[in-house]
Image (cartoon, rainbow, N blue to C red):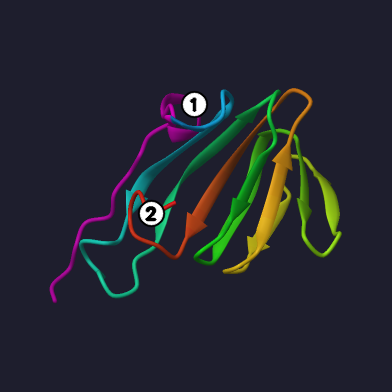
Amino acid sequence: MGSQAFQHFKNAQKEFKPPLIANENAYLGDVVSSEKNDPEKPISAGFYRLEKGTPLVYTYHYDEMKIIVEGEFDIKDETGQSVHATPGDVFYFPKGSKITFTTDSYGLGFYCGQRKEGGA
């Protein structure tokens, strides 16, 4: 396999608008995926935005890392763990975890998940 050029997504945090995925206030979209280069073990990365309103309850069917880049989230899991997340906080959500996301204003997170593009 020869060399491949890297990909650059200029100002993605401000320019990329993730599509609505749930309720009236939860948005998620993949910016990039390694699926074409590694279909056996793809990783996909993008942005998740939640606005004030209905909490999002999500069960992960893959491992994911997330860093909070703007705003804030309240994040809980089924074990009772609860965190008020702010910019700079990093999370690991293991496959099978059921997570509840809420916010009093909005939150924006950048994620990287071990899944195919669009597989959230």
Q: Can residue 87 be seen at all in this image of the molecule?
A: no
Q: Is residue 6 above or below residue 51?
A: below
Secondary element type, mark 2: loop
Is residue 11 located in the magenta-colored stretch of the structure?
A: yes
Q: Nearer the viewer, residue 55 or 115?
A: 55
Mark found first going from the N terminus, 2 or 1: 1
> Residue 31 appears in which quarter of the rendering?
top left
Q: Which quarter shows the N terminus?
A: bottom left
The Cα atoms of the two marked residues, 2 and 1, are separated by 23 Å
Q: Which mark is residue 85?
A: none
Q: Residue at x 68, y 29 (%)?
A: 54
Q: Is residue 56 visible?
A: yes
Q: Is residue 103 left or right of residue 10?
A: right
Residue sitting at x 85%, y 59%:
81
Front residue of 16 and 8: 16
Q: Is residue 61 left or right of residue 8?
A: right
Region of the chain picked out in magenta, as a range: 1-19
Please give the name of the residue rendered at 42% of the width and 25% of the height, measured from the top-left corner. 15
Q: Is residue 6 magenta?
A: yes
Q: Which residue is mark 1?
A: 14
Label 1 element class: helix
Residue highlighted by disc 2: 119
Residue ID at (57%, 69%):
95
Q: Could you tell whether 70 is left or right of 113 in the image?
A: right
- Up the image or down, 78 lies above or below 25; here it is below
Seen in the picture, residue 58 relative to 80 is either above or below; the reply is above
Lateral position of residue 67 relative to residue 104, left or right: left
Give the camera-side residue of 55 and 86.
55
